[in-house]
Amino acid sequence: MEIPLPDKEPLLSFLQDIIRIPSPSTKEREVVERVAEEMKRVGFPEVFLDEVGNVVGRIGSGGGKRLLYDAHTDTVGIGDPAAWSRDPYRAEIEEGVLYGRGAADNKGALAAMIYGAKCLIDAGLDLTGDLYVVGSVQEEECEGYAIGLLCRKLMPHAVLLGEPTDLQISRGQRGRIMLVVTTHGRSCHGSAPEQGVNAIYAMNKVAAGVEALNSKLAQHPFLGPGSVAVTRIESSAANLNAIPDRCQAHLDRRLIWGEDEELALTQVREIIQEEGVEAEVETMVYEARSHTGHPCRQKQYFSPWLLEEQDPLVQIGARTVKEVLGYEPQIIGWRFSTDGVATKGELGIPTIGFGPGEEVQAHSPDEHIPVADVVKAARVYAQLALDFLSR
C-alpha cells in the first residue's frame, strides 16, 4: 500500500502552535501537553509521559524491532529581543518560510515526525515492530539526560534524531565537557592592591593559556578539530573597592574521537601549573528538577560518538532519502552536541540524524525553517519507519 502524503496544513498549523508556546528547559509542560494532545488526535494508539516528562507516542505491533524518533521540545531563550526582526513566538510564515524560536531547533522535526507517523496510521499499515516518537525534554541544558532515561527502559534497536541537517544524514558529532576553573587570591582594600593577590589577574593567565591551547588541539578527519573556549568569568570580593579573592571561569571543551574527561582536565591542570597560580579545575555537574518535579543530576561530560558510514542504519537512511526526495544525501557530522551522546555515545544504540532546517539556525535570531522541508521530512520519516520495521 502506498503511503499517503502528509497533511500539510494541519502539520504547519500544529508546528505554529508549539512554536507559540515558550518552552525553556525544565518548563516544557505546556508544550508537552500540546504535543500529547496532537498525538492522540492523529491516532497514536498509545501516548504517555515518563517520569522526567518526555512525551512518547507509539504505533506498531507491540513486538519485534523498536525504532525511536527523538526531537526535543525545549528551546533556548531569545537573547536580545532587538536582534529579532519578527516576534520570536508569533510563528509567522512568509514566502514559504516559518520564523520563530524552535522552528529549526527542534520543533519543526517533532511536528514532521508526528505527521510522518500519521501517514502510516492513515494508510492502515501493519508494522512488524514499534515506532516511538518522542518529544524529549531538557536537551538544551543537558543533552542526553532525559532521552537516556527513556532509552534505558525501551532499549530501541535504532534511534533517529531530528536535529537540523538540512535534509542530509548525520552520523556523529564531537563530544563536550563543561569545566569550571577557580583561582584564589588574597583580598585587601582596592586603594592598596599591592597588599593582596588579585584572583582575576591569576585567571587572566589561565584564560590566556586556554586560548593558546585551542590552536594546539588534535583534529579528527571526519569530526573536525577539538576546541576549547572561556565562556564566562565571575569574581567575588567584599565589595567593589576590594581586591577579589576568588574568580571562576567556565570552559566549553569540545572533544574528538579518542579524547575524554581526564585528558581535558589534565590539559587545564598543566596550564595552571605552568602559570604558577593557585587554582583548581573540575567538571561541572548539572542539577535541576524536570517539569514533572523529577530530580535530575548528571556530570556535564558527554563523549563523542560516530557511526560508520557503512553501518546499515546510515545506509537505510541514505536510501530512504534518495527514494523519497530523489537525491543522494550528504553524510555529515554535526558541529553542535545532541541527544546522541546518550543513545550512541553511552548506550551504544545505532543513531543517525535527519531533520529539516539548517544547523546555523539553532540559537540564532530570526530562527527559521522552510515549510516545504518540514513536509519533506515527514515523508522521509514515514518511509524510513516502514522500511526499518518491515525488514
Image (tube, grey):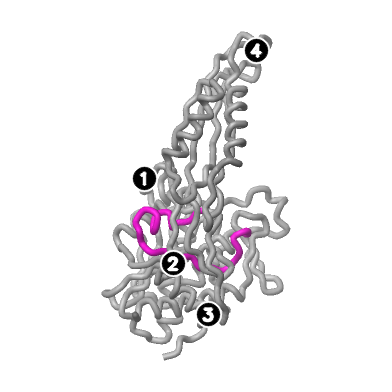
Question: Is residue 155 shown above or below 237?
Answer: below
The residues tagged by marks 2 and 1 sit, at their Cα atoms, a distance apart of: 27 Å
Q: Which residue is mark 3?
A: 322
Q: Earlier in the sequence, mark 3 or mark 1?
A: 1
Residue 58 in the image: x percent, y percent?
A: 36, 71
Q: Earlier in the sequence, mark 2 or mark 3?
A: 2
Residue 8 in the image: x percent, y percent?
A: 56, 79
Q: Which residue is mark 4?
A: 193
Q: Which residues are magenta?
A: 337-361
The residue closer to the viewer here, 271 or 282, is 271
Q: Earlier in the sequence, mark 2 or mark 1?
A: 2
Marks 2 and 1 in Cβ contact (< 8 Å): no
Is residue 191 left or right of 63 when viewed as pictured?
right
**Mark 3 neighbour density, 10 Å: few (under 14) some (14–19) many (20 or more):** some
* Amino acid carrying mark 2 in the image: Leu
Q: Which residue is mark 1?
A: 295
